[in-house]
């Protein structure tokens, strides 16, 4: 199940990066930083609760899991970078 979620997340991320890169090619080259990638995953679907952000100018993306884990991609796959701090 986790493998399916990871594959679905990477697929959505890649499609978001490709779409944002294509759309970004029509703007100036200064870039706008990280931009949210909109998806419409319903409850029960693999991507539900995941959040995606991309910066086409810097060729990077960030994915946040429903549990608060942060993943970074700089074109070589996702790499876990941080967990949301636990509340005291």
Image: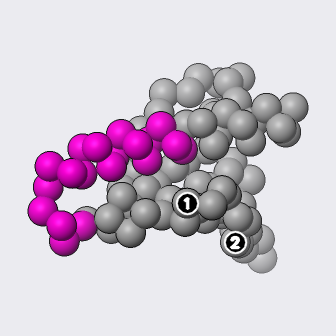
In primary-sequence order, the first of circles 2 and 1 is 1
Range of residues picked out in magenta: 13-31
Foreground pick, 2 / 43: 2
Residue 42 place in picture, x, y as percent: 59, 23
Q: How is the image coloured?
A: one colour
Residue 49 place in picture, x, y as percent: 62, 40
Q: Residue lying farthest right?
A: 1
The residue drawn where x is 40% and y is 51% is: 36
Callout 2: SS: strand
Residue 81 bears which disc, if any? 2
Residue 75 bears which disc, if any? 1
- Residue 14 in the magenta stretch? The answer is yes
The dominant secondary structure in magenta is helix
The residue drawn where x is 24% and y is 51% is: 24
- Left or right of residue 88: residue 76: left
Q: Quadrant of residue 86?
A: bottom right
């Amino acid at each position: 199940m986790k493998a399916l979620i990871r594959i679905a997340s990477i697929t959505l991320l890649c499609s978001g990066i490709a779409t944002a890169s294509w759309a970004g090619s029509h703007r100036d080259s200064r870039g706008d930083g990280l931009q949210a990638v909109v998806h419409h995953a319903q409850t029960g679907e693999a991507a539900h609760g995941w959040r995606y952000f991309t910066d086409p100018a810097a060729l990077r993306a960030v994915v946040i899991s429903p549990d608060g884990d942060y993943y970074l991609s700089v074109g070589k796959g996702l790499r876990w970078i941080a967990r949301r701090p636990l509340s005291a």
